[in-house]
Image (spheres, grey):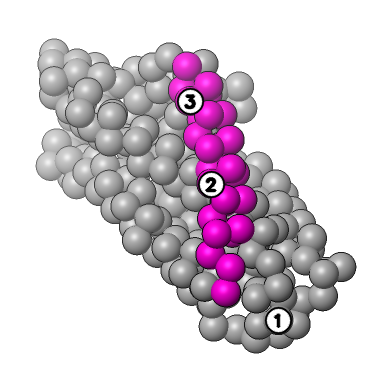
Amino acid sequence: MPGAERPVGRSGGRVLYAACALSQFLVAAGVSVVTTMGPALREANGLRASRLPWAVLVYVLALGLLVRPLRLLIRRTRPLPVLILGLWLFVQSSVALTLVSGASAFLGFRAVQGAGAAALTATALALALVGHRPHRLLLVWAAVAVAGFGTGLAAGAVVGAEWRWTLWANVPLTAAAGIPLVRLLRSTRRRDKAVGGRAGAGDGDGVGVRQEDGDGDGVGLGEGDGAQDAAA
């Protein structure tokens, strides 16, 4: 059943939230990184100084407009497909941005990168808002976003003519966030098949608590030694 959850053990929960935090660090850094890359980026892509703000705007618009629909999609299905979509879009567009020439292509792939960031953000929201101490998690989220935004500004200013390396760095960093998330989310699907009809029963080691956030997202996280991970 979409949204039905079982417990996440303490170690699994730490990995889950750390991976979500890293993904949101990358999302926030993606907003600001191009603003200070300077003339090297503009010359490589034919971006006049007057058009450089669009490299930020199209990313932010795609991110802002798509988060809500993707959260609704997660509520009706599961987080895993949206997460995989976000990882794929974010990585592929980051690589494409280092290869394309021309302002239109560059801005187009920035919009695709924003769409990937929206999928990562929707997944992280669905997981974080139903965890233990959600208000504390949101404070950590805000701190991570501020750190990512500042790091993006600093990195863009430092790299100068080597701006492509900043975008290439998204590949290993996104993998570092995505691989543990995908593994944790897939684990419940495998265990669902193993337990069959007992999928939602609990066995005394720790019963998953289904919680809903303000939007009614049915993604719950529990805790216990009988660790089942967040539903895929």
Question: Which of 104 and 35 lies nearest the eye of the viewer?
Answer: 35
Q: Secondary structure at mark 2?
A: helix
Q: Is 186 located above or below residue 11 in the figure?
A: below
Residue 144 counted in the magenta span? yes
Real-space Cα separation, disc 2 to disc 3, in angstroms: 16 Å
Query: How many numbered discs, if any?
Result: 3
Do the CB atoms of the residues marked 1 and 2 lie less than 8 Å apart?
A: no
Q: Is residue 56 left or right of residue 174?
A: right
Q: Is 195 located above or below residue 56 in the figure?
A: above
Q: Is 12 located above or below residue 133 in the figure?
A: below
Q: Is residue 68 left or right of residue 23?
A: right
Magenta-drawn segment:
136-161
Which residue carries the number 2 mark? 151
Query: Extreme right residue here?
Result: 50
Local packing at callout 2 (Cα closer than 10 Å; few below 14, some 14-19, many 20+) is some
Three-letter code for the amino acid on which mark 3 is drawn:
Val
Which residue carries the number 3 mark? 140
Residue 198 counted in the magenta span? no
Residue 9: x %, y % from top left = 21, 25
Which residue carries the number 1 mark? 43
Three-letter code for the amino acid on which mark 1 is drawn:
Glu
Real-space Cα separation, disc 1 to disc 2, in angstroms: 23 Å
